Image: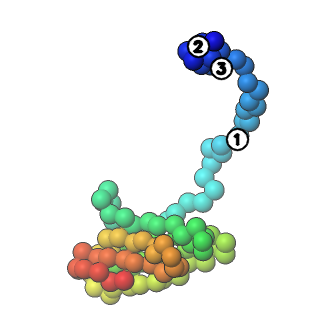
Amino acid sequence: MSVVQALAKNKTSKTSVSKSNRHISQLPERILDAPDIVDDYYLNLLDWNKASNQLAVCLAQSVYLWNAQTGDTTMLLDTNDDDVIVTSIAWRPSESSQRFDSDQGNKS
């Protein structure tokens, strides 16, 4: 039997693969209320930390943390300056701390 025939035979042979159907809800589990979020595609205003199960959210001059386990919200940073907008948030990979940037420079 040639290699081509062997491949063709394997391709046409039936294998027993069970497919499981999963339900995808049409309703949201949570809704994020972010009134001062800047509408700019190029900004990174949300970041999820899988280890601590927290979401960091940049809202104009402030950065908030939302804990998914407890539902608590904590203000992490407020620049107190209307001319400064937080433009990026990222969790540091090896720690449970964040790095954030503004349009005026790094603030981490």
Q: Amino acid at mark 3?
A: Asn
Q: Earlier in the sequence, mark 1 or mark 3?
A: 3
Residue placed most toward the observer, 13 or 1: 1
Disc 3 element? helix
Asked whether residue 8 appears in the rendered view, the answer is: no
Question: Which residue is the site of mark 2?
Answer: 2
Sooner in the amino-acid sequence: mark 2 or mark 3: 2
Instruction: From the top left corner, tell me how far across and down residue 93 is, in percent.
Output: 48, 72
Image point (39%, 66%), residue name? 45
Give residue 86's position: percent from left, percent from top: 33, 75
As shown in the figure, which amino acid type bears the numbered disc 1? His
Q: Measured along the vertical axis of the image, is residue 29 above or below residue 98?
A: above
Give the labeled residue for mark 3: 10
Q: Nearer the viewer, mark 2 or mark 3?
A: 2
Quadrant containing the N terminus in the rendered view: top right
Q: Is residue 79 left or right of residue 24?
A: left
| Res. 43 mark | none
What quarter of the picture does the C terminus occupy?
bottom left
Give the colour scheme shown: rainbow
Q: CA distance from mark 1 to mark 2?
A: 45 Å
* CB within 8 Å, label 1 to label 3: no
What residue does disc 1 label? 23
